[in-house]
Image (cartoon, rainbow, N blue to C red):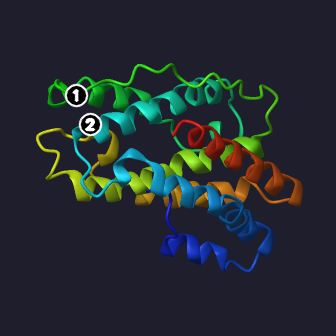
Amino acid sequence: MWECLTEQEQSINQHPNRAQADALSALRVATADRHAVLDSGMPLAQPDAGLQHYSDHLHMLRRWLSPLEAWLARYSDGPQGESGLPAVARVALIDADLADPALGGVRADTRAEDDTVWPIAASAAYRWGVTYVIEGSQLGGAVLYQRLAGPLAPHPLRYLRSGAEGPGPRWRNFMLALREGVKSEGEIADACKGACDAFDRILAMR
């Protein structure tokens, strides 16, 4: 339910410039185990997922994303600069879904949001890694939307829908930008650290 290996990513991984290709392959290797654990542990992983599961899923993501969005908004370089993609107000989409009348009879999760203090001096490469996890999550969301749009109707599933064009074009553009922003061995190591930290925070919320 998180990112999946797309044809575009496979093509980039085969790029003759191995320093660029390695940024993506290294991120996948570094996060593979965490990805597998999270994929099976999210509320919507249940085969009979209903509106209660969707509410739990949204609350979990909100506790994780809210401090991350606030932290990333401090920066204007790297993935938050001109080389990155326009920001998406994902927490606002989550809030709209949680406020939808279709969830009127569903129990709300009242746990506080994540209190992790993200590093103010984080490198752009570290933030590329964190952003890799956030952007990758939308690919899984699109798959979930296809599976749940009917069973959970009339809820519009705004957060999972991710626009008429789907998440594919944005993900392809993100991968191209990441390979330009993360090239050296040190940058790749920083990006992997950021991605692993982002996964670890949401894994701790299960």
- Residue type pointed to by label 1: Val
3 left or right, relative to 33: left
Residue assigned mark 1: 106
- Residue type pointed to by label 2: Gln
User: Which residue is located at x 76 percent, y 55 percent?
Assistant: 182
Q: Quadrant of residue 117?
A: top right
Front-lying residue, 47 or 21: 47
Checking the image for residue 182, the label placed there is none
Label 2 environment density (alpha carbons within 10 Å; few <14, some 14–19, many ≥20):
some
Front-lying residue, 183 or 155: 155
The mark nearer the N terminus, 1 or 2, is: 2
Q: Quadrant of residue 52?
A: top left
- Which quadrant of the figure contains the N terminus? bottom left
Residue 131 shows up from this direction: yes
Q: Vertical placement of 103 versus 29: above or below? A: above
Label 1 environment density (alpha carbons within 10 Å; few <14, some 14–19, many ≥20):
some
Q: What x and y, as percent, mark residue 127?
A: 70, 41
Q: What x and y, as percent, mark residue 183?
A: 80, 60
Residue assigned mark 2: 52
119 left or right, relative to 53: right
91 left or right, relative to 184: left
Measured Cα–Cα span from mark 1 to mark 2: 6 Å
SS for callout 2: helix
Q: Please identify the residue farthest to the left as the structure is shown.
A: 154
User: Which residue is located at x 54 percent, y 36 percent?
Assistant: 205
Circles 1 and 2 in contact, beta carbons < 8 Å: yes
Q: What x and y, as percent, mark residue 161?
A: 29, 47
